[in-house]
Every structure is written in C-alpha cells, then in structure tokens.
Amino acid sequence: MENKLRVSLVIPAHNEEKYIANCLSAAIKNSRGRFFEIMVIDNASSDRTGDEASKFPGVRVVREEKKGLTQARERGFQEARGDILAYIDADTLMPEHWFEILEKEFETHKNLAALSGPYDYYDVPKWQRLLIKCYWTISGLLAYRIAGYLVVGGNFAIKRDILEKMHGFDTSIAFYGEDTNIARRASKFGKVKFLPKFFIYTSGRRFHGQGFFKTAVIYTANFFSEAIIHKPITKKYKDIR
C-alpha cells in the first residue's frame, strides 16, 4: 500500500545500546512498514548503539561525531528524505495508534507545521505516573494555551519545508529548552499542535537520576525562559543512563 505521506523517522542516540533495540522493534511493529525511512543518528556513542541498530533490516545508521542532542537532530534533518520528519528518543516505545494520528493530523490540517504530544512513563511508580499525567493535563496544557505552542523533544513531527524555513535546529542549545525553541520558531510558519492522545511511552530514567520534582522544575523553567526571552536558563546537563 502506497503511503500518502513520506514520513522519515529519526532517532538520535548517544550510548543507547540498552534501549535502542526495543525502540526500533516497537516503531517497526506499530508503524507496520509505513515509514518512508527509519534512521538512527549514532551521536558519538562509545558503546554498541550503532551495532545494535544495524541489526534491523532497513534501518539506516548515521554516525555523527559532534556530541549533542541538537547536533544529532540537525544531522537527521540533513540526511532524511521525507516530507515529514518524526523525531523520537531512543528510550521510547511507540504505541500502535501513533502513526495513524500523525498521518491524520497532517493530512487533515494543511497549515500544521509540527505535531507533538506528552510522554507516558512506563517504568516509574504508579504515584509518579499519576502525578505526571496531572502535570501534563494541568501545567502542560496551560503552557500550551498561554504560548500557543508546545513541543516535547522526544515525541514530535515537523514538516521538512518548515525546518528549511527555520534554517534547521539551533545547535547552540545543548539540551534544555531545545524543544521549546523548535516550537516557538516553527509557530511563525504554521500551527504547532500539542495533542494529548499523541503520546509515546518512555523511560523515567531522568526522574530516577536527578529527582522527580527537580526535573519538573527545570523543564518548566526552561520552557518559559525560551518562550519569553528566547533562550534557556539551564546551560549544562549530564547524561543519564
């Protein structure tokens, strides 16, 4: 069956040998072969991330030696050939309905520049999972209504021509605030839509590594900082495995 949309799936991955196989398995199974291409950006990994990804037929592995999330995203933009570029993190698990929602939204809303949705953490305690859902329902949707845009960096899709108009990703941003930067800049050229049902399962390892409340505060602060003064306030981050 010929797809109406050419969707490239791009997965930035730095030292993700523990997660990348499950991520790719879920993406391949639940998209049922409808991605135009699937690409893993092996971002200066020192482990077997590239080797693990290469085991999957049809998955292209691109090595990017400049370490950094935005560097990996930009390399994906330069290498991908689809009309829509979908970005997910290497520790995510794509739900069955994910591709259908993406396809329907971009086919139905011609002015849609980018689409994103929340995380659903599969490996955190029940009380944290409930609290996080409340966070997305209250704080996330409130921020979306106030700003008019919201992108979650490990779960979004954007039109290629919008990225071209944006001149790609801002590689000067190391980590925090990069997703809001994408949303703010893309919103100048079309609608940036945040849809709760367009969620993706992900690991709660950052909550485990630096604490639930600290993580929530850092992400919220950098959202408003990028939205208001157009730059994140947190300059440094540490890799958490």
Image (tube, rainbow, N blue to C red):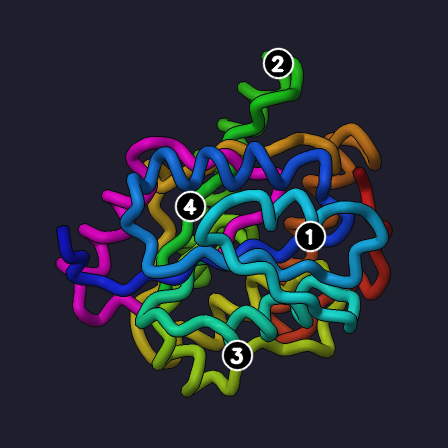
Q: Which residue is mark 4?
A: 117
Q: CA distance from mark 4 to mark 2?
A: 21 Å
Q: Which residue is mark 3?
A: 78
| Three-letter amino acid code of the residue under disc 1 | Gly
Q: Quick one: label 1 or label 2, which is nearer the N terminus?
A: 1
Q: Which residue is mark 1?
A: 50
Circle count: 4
Secondary element under disc 3, as helix, strand or loop, is helix
**Quadrant hosting residue 16:** top right
**Quadrant hosting residue 208:** top right
Residues at marks 4 and 3 touching, judged by CB atoms closer than 8 Å: no
Residues at marks 1 and 3 touching, judged by CB atoms closer than 8 Å: no
Q: Which residue is mark 2?
A: 127
Q: CA distance from mark 3 to mark 2?
A: 41 Å
Binning the other alpha carbons within 10 Å of mark 4 as few (below 14), some (14 to 19) or many (20 upward) gives many
Q: Which residues are magenta?
A: 87-113
From the viewer's perspective, is the residue at label 4 or at label 2 nearer?
4
**Looking at the picture, does residue 2 appear above or below residue 241?**
below
